[in-house]
């Protein structure tokens, strides 16, 4: 090093990872900062998942057609419409031409390519079946996207219902009720208790709306920061598991089995596959149980017995996994378990939403009915006032 100051961009999960990577290259970092804002970063992370699926689909097709890897990547770099994805593909191609393996080149872009993705590519390279592994990765990414899209689509209507109902109640409290309160104040007399409660709530919201808005924002920020911490995330996931146990267990079982089955089919060793499958599980309570499964697998117990001791995975899934272990077809049976529970999850989500919608309609209806009845009682009480 000649002591010169160098400025540049390095790709990493966060600023701490960037510092570690810079130190490993012999550079002394003076200042490291993220070039993107939070909202833009989140949007980019979401869009990159779709870009990775497109990249995998197209590269799998090119390799299956007999094209060499560097030629396929060169074609994708030319065809890619997304500037950032184009730059990533070009960087990967450059690393490969400099002597790096495909998996090592992908590993330099951890925000775009997950550990699971990289490990499957590495297994495909080791076995000389990269085109087959890419095809399995494509199936995995498509099924994951389809499952997520289904969950989002069925929750759109309840979300719209909640938002519109909430807006209706706020409009009634802040715009409609104050007009009636002026009339009641001029006439005088005692109002029904429910009407007094409503008018007090209306006056509070109208006068101190900024305090209410600030309280909501502060509460939301506190909740987000709490759930980002390890202890807070664990407690929140534990609560979700209690409230939506059946749906979450089916969701995580489908994710775990599809990921583990895909990794094993691609030639990834069991212990490494278990660690990658754990990273896919979003519920930290369920993910924590995978450590005991890995320990049991190290001791030669297989995975069925440790999985059954976690009391998280459904009995049917455990029975199917046990059959897979006994017949030497664990990877195939895991994929069947995933398919079974993805179908079961779709049914469970539809059933949950079909129950959630009337409950939300009932709650919103009761709140609006309470407001309307309270106003009618106040209007009827006017007839009792002396003129």
Image (cartoon, rainbow, N blue to C red):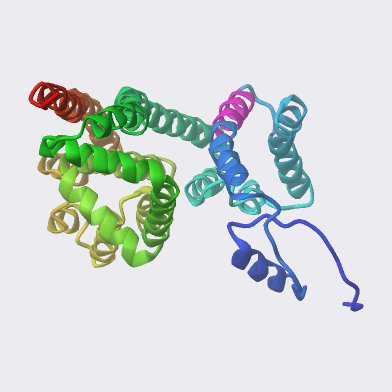
- Can you name the residue that lies furthest to the front here? 387
Horizontal side, residue 270 vs residue 131: left or right: left
Residue at 57 percent of width and 35 percent of height: 47
- In the rendered image, the quadrant that contains the N terminus is bottom right
Q: Is residue 253 left or right of residue 27?
A: left
For the stretch drawn in magenta, the main secondary structure is: helix
Residue sitting at x 38%, y 32%: 148
Front in this rendered view, residue 45 or 288: 45
- Foreground pick, 121 / 242: 242
Residue 330 appears in view: no
Q: Please report the residue visible at 77 percent of the width from the left and 27 percent of the height from the top.
A: 78
Q: Quadrant of residue 130?
A: top right
Q: Nearer the viewer, residue 123 or 357?
A: 357
Q: Quadrant of residue 339?
A: top left
Say which residue appears at 59% left-offset and 60% top-offset.
Answer: 14
358 lies left or right of 329:
left
Q: Which residues are magenta?
A: 52-64
Residue 228 in sight here: yes
Residue 131 falls within the magenta-colored stretch: no
Q: How many marks?
A: 0
The quadrant of the image that shows the C terminus is: top left
Residue 42's place in the image compared with 110, above or below, is: above
**Is 54 in the magenta?**
yes
The image quadrant of residue 372 is top left
Residue 174 coordinates in the image, percent (x, y): 36, 33
In the displayed structure, does residue 102 sit left or right of residue 136? right
Q: Position of residue 122 (x, y in %)?
A: 54, 49
Residue 257: horizontal and vertical position, in percent? Answer: 29, 42
Residue 265 placed where, x, y %?
39, 40
């Amino acid at each position: 090093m000649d002591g010169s100051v160098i400025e540049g961009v390095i790709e990493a999960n966060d600023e701490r990872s960037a510092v570690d990577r810079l130190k490993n290259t012999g550079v002394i970092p003076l200042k490291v900062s993220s070039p993107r804002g939070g909202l833009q970063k989140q949007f980019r992370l979401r869009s990159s998942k779709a870009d990775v699926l497109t990249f995998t689909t197209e590269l799998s097709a090119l390799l299956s057609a007999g094209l060499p890897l560097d030629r396929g990547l060169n074609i994708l770099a030319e065809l890619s419409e997304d500037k950032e994805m184009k730059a990533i593909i070009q960087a990967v191609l450059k690393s490969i031409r400099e002597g790096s393996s495909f998996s090592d080149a992908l590993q330099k872009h951890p925000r775009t390519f997950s550990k699971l993705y990289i490990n499957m590519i590495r297994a495909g390279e080791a076995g000389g079946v990269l085109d087959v592994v890419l095809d399995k990765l494509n199936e995995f990414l498509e099924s994951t996207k389809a499952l997520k899209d289904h969950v989002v689509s069925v929750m759109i209507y309840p979300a719209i219902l909640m938002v519109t109902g909430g807006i209706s109640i706020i409009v009634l409290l802040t715009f409609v009720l104050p007009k009636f309160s002026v009339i009641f104040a001029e006439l005088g007399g005692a109002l029904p208790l429910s009407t007094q409660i409503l008018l007090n709530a209306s006056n509070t919201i109208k006068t101190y709306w900024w305090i209410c808005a600030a309280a909501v924002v502060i509460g939301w920020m506190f909740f987000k920061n709490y759930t980002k911490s390890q202890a807070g995330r664990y407690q929140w996931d534990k609560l979700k598991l209690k409230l939506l146990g059946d749906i979450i267990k089916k969701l995580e079982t489908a994710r775990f089995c599809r990921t583990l089955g895909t990794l094993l089919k691609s030639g990834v060793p069991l212990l490494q596959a278990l660690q990658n499958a754990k990273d896919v599980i979003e519920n930290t309570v369920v993910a924590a149980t995978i450590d005991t499964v890995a320990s049991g697998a190290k001791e030669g117990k297989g995975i069925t017995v440790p999985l059954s001791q976690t009391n998280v995975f459904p009995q049917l899934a455990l029975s199917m996994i046990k059959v897979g272990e006994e017949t030497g077809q664990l990877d195939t049976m895991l994929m069947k378990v995933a398919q079974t529970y993805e179908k079961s999850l779709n049914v469970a989500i539809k059933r949950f939403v079909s129950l959630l919608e009337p409950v939300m309609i009932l709650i919103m209806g009761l709140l609006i009915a309470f407001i309307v009845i309270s106003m009618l009682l106040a209007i009827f009480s006017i007839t009792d006032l002396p003129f």
